[in-house]
Amino acid sequence: MSTPALLFPGQGSQRVGMGADLCREFAVARETFQEADAALGEKLSELCFTGPEDRLTLTENAQPALLTTSLAVARVLAAEGGLVPQIAAGHSLGEWTALVVMAALDFGDAVRAVRSRGRFMQEAVAPGVGAMSALLGADLAAAEALCVEASQGDEIVVAANVNGAGQIVVSGHQAALARLEALASGRKVRAMRLKVSAPFHSPLMAPARERMAALLRDVPVRAPRGVVLGNVDGEPYGDADSVRERLCAQITGTVLWEACARGVAARTDRGIEAGPGRVLCGLFRRIAPEFRCVATDDVAGVRAALEGARA
């Protein structure tokens, strides 16, 4: 039987209390949160465990919080079940976690970098300028046609996430997004505005991409020790240089999650969503129904994943 792939969630999966029960049960999880606290010089652990929610959901906090929680799960799976993944993928921010697990990045460097990433992304666009919507019932061609029609002059909207199973997230200027939503309603496509603070994965994030490129020049990187499928094209990472290039490209580029999921399913028949939530397992059920996915949103889920890995 193949080794399960590890799948890492992105921003939006965070919740107050994540990681708390894991730390009560497993020393390696406690050590992971302590390492994050030391790297950042503040108690990220307390923010994860007790909130408040409005602070945890801030982009610059949610990103290091998710990285730390997901890595804690991965380390528990390794320490308690001997699970050394050969394949990993992550959605947006989750791609950073996959690279840490596959030894392309050191955790301390990564948690500091994603704290900056979140701040850069938040500061790239003034509040109220941009937004994102999920389109339900549209394929990529239909979504891109809507984006072209809704974009006017400097006001643009683009496909940001291709999540699969008829779900495309679009991102851009508020005015262009409003035009797209009006067009979608007449074409039997449901548009659902997302509760996000900026138009992520769009050209509006160009200032964040430039700042991230400068930061990553001083961060040591290595080629991943296993297969990490990249969001920008669904293909495996190559050498160390590609780590910096792809992590920057991802900030303004489209997250091709469906391509990543199909790449994972072509290499193994099962996976573990390591971290809070069940979003990725839900997407896999629709993209690759034969793929078996276990979520680890709590200690019970982690124990189930450990039992499945031993089976």
Image (cartoon, rainbow, N blue to C red):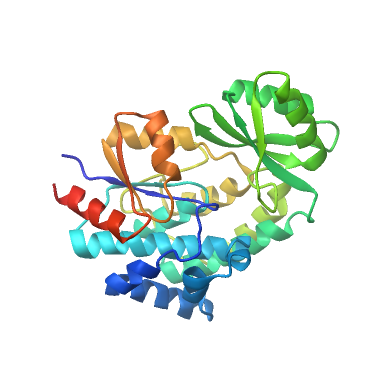
Above or below for 244 versus 294: below
Q: Which of 62/40 is in front?
A: 62
* Residue 167 vertical position relative to residue 32 in the rendered view, above or below: above
Report x, y in % for residue 238.
Answer: 40, 46
Q: Is residue 90 visible?
A: yes
User: How many dots with numbers?
Assistant: 0
Closer-to-camera residue (237/289) = 289
Q: Is residue 201 left or right of residue 228?
A: right
Give how far across and how far down residue 89 sits, in percent.
Answer: 40, 46
Q: Position of residue 147 (x, y in %)?
A: 72, 28
Name the residue rendered at 77%, 27% in the picture: 182
Identify which residue is drawn at 35% across, 75% down.
30
Task: Give me the residue at 77% from left, 24% from top.
Answer: 149
Q: Residue at x 42, y 38 (%)?
A: 282
Q: Is residue 159 above or below residue 145?
A: below
Which residue is situated farthest in the right direction here? 153
Q: Which of 76 and 96 lies nearest the eye of the viewer?
A: 76
**Observer able to see residue 235:** no
Q: Which quadrant of the figure contains the N terminus?
A: top left
Residue that protrudes farthest toward the left in the picture: 311
Image coords of residue 50 (percent x, y)? 50, 72
